[in-house]
């Protein structure tokens, strides 16, 4: 049987290993403190002193099945009300002592879809098409950027010929949008317009 004799580490090796351990421990403690301090940071909401995203508590993901619905139609007697109801108070919240207004990106995107929907209905009714209006350009560009930003890599099943594919995702794993609605409702009660 092969036996391995215990090796003795030299003083230099022990000192080196101790230094590495101390540096790693120090870095770990510094990173933990940095993460805690940025999570607890307060903002004035004046000038550029605000967080990039609204720091509200978010739970785990929720599943949303793909479903064809009779609601949120392009043109229907209730369409405008249904689309407007998705962005309470136009999705505007107020933060900080000076009640600085901010738009939540989710609501900005919903408003853009509704604006484009209304433009489609108007063009169909009047025959006047305004594809290059400033608001249309803004909304198309904003939605394009948000889609790239999300970079969703979920695989959707493709049915039918490739020339005219029918893409059928089974469900989406989403952030819990109800938590955003609840936080907006609380904010809008606190800061009525």
Image (cartoon, rainbow, N blue to C red):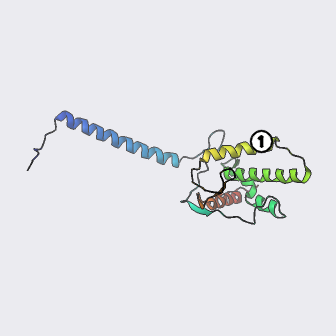
Q: Is residue 44 visible?
A: no
Residue 103: where, in percent of width, then height?
A: 70, 49
Q: Secondary structure at mark 1?
A: helix
Res 176 quadrant in image: bottom right
Q: Is residue 39 left or right of residue 17?
A: right
Q: Is residue 112 left or right of residue 186?
A: right
Q: Is residue 157 left or right of residue 141?
A: left
Q: Is residue 12 visible?
A: yes
Quarter occupied by the C terminus? bottom right
The number of numbered discs placed on residues in the rendered structure image is 1
| Foreground of the two, 46 or 172 | 172
Most distant residue in the left direction: 1
Circle 1 sits on which residue?
Answer: 137
Residue 108: where, in percent of width, then height?
A: 71, 50
| Foreground of the two, 89 or 69 | 69
The residue located at (79%, 53%) in the rendering is: 117
Residue 80: where, in percent of width, then height?
A: 81, 59
Most distant residue in the right direction: 126
179 shown above or below 131 = below
Quick one: label 1, few (<14), some, or many (20+) residues within 10 Å? Answer: some
The residue located at (34%, 43%) in the rendering is: 25
The residue located at (78%, 61%) in the rendering is: 73
Q: Is residue 68 left or right of residue 57?
A: right
Residue 183: where, in percent of width, then height?
A: 64, 58
Res 23 quadrant in image: top left
């Amino acid at each position: 049987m092969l036996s391995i004799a215990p090796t003795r580490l030299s003083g230099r090796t022990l000192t080196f290993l101790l230094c590495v351990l101390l540096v790693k421990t120090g870095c770990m403690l510094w990173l933990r403190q940095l993460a805690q301090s940025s999570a607890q940071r307060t903002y004035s909401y004046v000038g550029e002193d605000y967080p990039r995203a609204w720091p509200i508590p978010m739970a785990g993901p929720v599943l949303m099945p793909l479903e064809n619905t009779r609601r949120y139609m392009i043109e229907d007697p209730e369409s405008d009300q249904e689309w407007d109801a998705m962005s309470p108070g136009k999705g505007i919240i107020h933060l900080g002592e000076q009640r600085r207004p901010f738009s939540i990106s989710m609501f900005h995107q919903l408003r853009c879809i509704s604006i484009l929907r209304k433009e489609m209905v108007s063009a169909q009714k009047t025959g006047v098409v305004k594809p290059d209006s400033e608001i249309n350009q803004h909304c198309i560009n904003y939605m394009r950027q948000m889609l790239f930003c999300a970079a969703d890599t979920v695989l959707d099943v493709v049915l039918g010929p490739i020339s005219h594919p029918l893409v059928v995702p089974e469900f989406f794993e989403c952030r819990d949008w109800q938590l955003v609605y609840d936080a907006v409702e609380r904010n809008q009660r606190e800061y009525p317009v």
